Image (tube, helix red, strand yellow):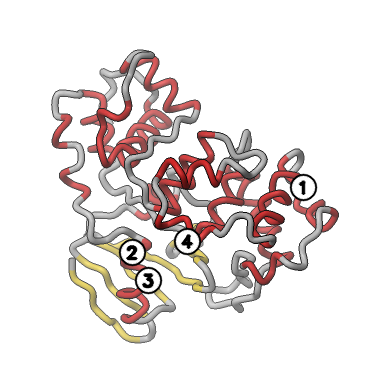
Amino acid sequence: MKITDKGSKKILIDDCNISLKDTFDCGQCFRWTFDGVGWVGVVGRKAVRCIQQENGFIIENTTLDEVESFWRKYFDLDRDYGSIALDFEDDKYLTAAAEFGKGIRILRQEPLETLISFIISSNNNIKRIRGIINRFCQSYGKSLGSPFGEELFAFPDTEDLEKITFEGLAPLRAGFRQKYIMDAIEKVRRGELVLDSLNDLSTCDVGAALMSVKGVGQKVSDCILLFAYGRHEVFPKDVWIKRVISDIYGDDCYVANFGENAGIIQQYLFHYARNYGTNVEKEP
């Protein structure tokens, strides 16, 4: 991997196997949108546009220092994704899935945003999830200006949570999830759930803390563990993954066999199944 400052707050990350489309569209995040030029996203209070290149990508509206201190970890740029599926070469379906999804990287996202986003994602579709999250940010997040045309807003931080009421969440049109969002907010602002302090706990203990929030079950907890806390051994099971397990591996599948990178393998299987189903003979 090579990182080059191209000037005008544009940084080129080269010799890096990544597909921005597959990474941003594989269900792990909800605030990246393609504007015809690149993928515009907001992470924390950073608004950037990422433009796909043949062997990497360009990040606009950032600096070399920010790439090294923040974006490098966010995009998991130092991990060798190419070797992850090699131990499973006898698994025809996984081999095809890994080849199809070889440009996917697991993003390291902000815990508060990931918690609330995956509460919103419960029994929901991508378009509606994004709409609810965008309304939440516009209502309570800080404006980041309009670096790429449309005004962008940060995800509300702990300071912003202080002004949120249950009634004030009604315009989000989140349905039954409104009470779960409010429970998460109340637990965070009362100090019952200190998200940043969970990093030092075991995966099991982090999961238990997350599931103290109403509406957070095993699947949502596993998604937060994987996408916010970097627990790559976790294997979230949504409807697509359950179908893969049933059709390909059998109901007695022991997902721990996928090892320390089970969460990455889960993304390969999820992405492939969503595009090709569970026909083991299907080639990408």
Residue beneath disc 1: 173
- Alpha-carbon span between mark 4 and mark 3: 25 Å
Rendered view: 205 above or below 91: below
| Residue type for callout 2 | Lys
Give the image quarter of residue 71: bottom left
Looking at the image, residue 240 sits to the left or right of residue 189; the answer is left
Badges 1 and 2: C-beta atoms under 8 Å apart?
Answer: no
Between label 4 and label 2, give the one nearer the viewer: 2
Residue beneath disc 4: 36
Q: Position of residue 195 (x, y in %)?
A: 53, 58
Q: Position of residue 139 (x, y in %)?
A: 74, 65
Q: Residues within 10 Å of mark 4 (few under 14, many from 20)?
A: few
Badges 1 and 3: C-beta atoms under 8 Å apart?
Answer: no
**Residue 73: image tag:** 2
**Which comes sooner in the sequence, label 1 or label 2?**
2
| Residue type for callout 4 | Gly
- The residue sitting at the bottom extreme is 7
